[in-house]
Image: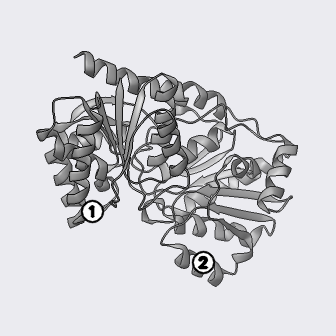
Amino acid sequence: MKVLIVVEPGFAGVFRQVEGLVRYLHRQGVSVAMAYSDRRPSPGLPILIKEIEQHGGEVLNLRTINRPTLSDLRATWMLSRFIAKVRPDVIHAHSSKAGALVRILTKSMPKRPVFYTPNAYYGMGRTGLLAGFFDLLERCLAPRAITINISEDEARFAREVLGSIRRGPIIPNPVLVEHFLPASPAEKRAARQALGLPEKGIIIGTSGRLVFQKDPMTAIKALEPLFHQMPDLCFVDLGEGNLVKELEGEALSEGVTSQIVRLHYLEETLPFYQALDGFLLTSRYEAGIPFVFLEAAVCGLPLVTTLPPGMTALPRLGLSHCWTADVGEVEELTKGLTALIAEVRAHPEGIATNHRHLIEKQFSHEACYAPVLAEYRKALAG
């Protein structure tokens, strides 16, 4: 079997999902080719490209971006020629831009199974003319691919708002449970030292793009009253985005700059999680439970999170130390953080959560990627 992966963007959760899928397919003896864009790349993208080429796969740089532009015409032409050259058995597009390019071409391509993983529809967390345009585009292209959603919420949006979806299964984001491990006290000290963080005190962290979707301002505002009460409280923010200056201005005006550490990028994120006492997520919407949340959970960390569209099923997992709040509810998040910190102080030797046990069973690579491969084979057999 030869699978063509088409992806844009080349960073954040979309890239993480593609990266894991490619490596899983390679382990299963599946040939993989990839069309991608380096306009918004993850630093891990060149590594993945090299791995695909080492396995005999072909790659193509579409040089496009997530917004509609005239460059899409050239990208569509390039992708059409690439498909004719590679002759894949299955095509799987990830993200709305890649999904649009692939599905636009399906009318002119030889019949073959085409899959689409949206990784959060634009309209799930936004309103207005642009959201309406993207919803219309998704509705028009929906019949041209089998859609694999990553949460019940995303599938419900597809069904109720977008309509005529060729629905595949709901397959969640996976986490590499073998790699993301809870820290011993010695490992926590070493991780903090390696990242230049305070050895003592409480450290809460978050990871994600500093953009509208992730709502990082709400995280800062929820922590502000605790910063003033707890001089030993430190917040570590791993991510970049267009809201950096706004966040820095807020921290400066509240006099809490010294208690916030911003890490721009880590090739290896395990030390980040192992340095933390707890993890905070404040998203406005997600396609499903995001990678960073799963990684923090499988590391055994206590958690505070909003319950945005895409994550409303989270309470059913039964996580023992997970405090939740409505989207944008600063006071609820502050209460959750207060309870988390109280637990950390009451158990200086470490909190025994059930998080790793629950995540291992439902979100391992085998649990999440094996069904994707099974869908490919079922479509080919059909």
> Which residue shows up at 27% across the image and 62% down it?
127
Q: Is residue 210 above or below residue 362?
A: below
Q: Earlier in the sequence, mark 2 or mark 1?
A: 1
Label disc, if present, on residue 127 of the rendered structure: 1
Q: Identify residue type, mark 2.
A: Glu
Residue in the image at 16% along x and 39% along y: 106
From the viewer's side, name the closer residue of 62 and 265: 62
Report the quarter where the N terminus lies: top left
Whole-angstrom CA distance, mark 2 to mark 1, is 28 Å
In the rendered view of the protein, which quadrant contains the C terminus? top left
Q: Position of residue 112 (x, y in %)?
A: 21, 29
Secondary structure at numbered mark 1 = loop
Q: State the mark number for residue 248.
A: 2
Q: Does 211 sit left or right of 219 as displayed?
A: left
**Mark 1, other Cα within 10 Å: few <14 / some 14–19 / many ≥20:** few
**Residues under numbered marks 2 and 1 in contact, where contact means CB atoms less than 8 Å apart:** no
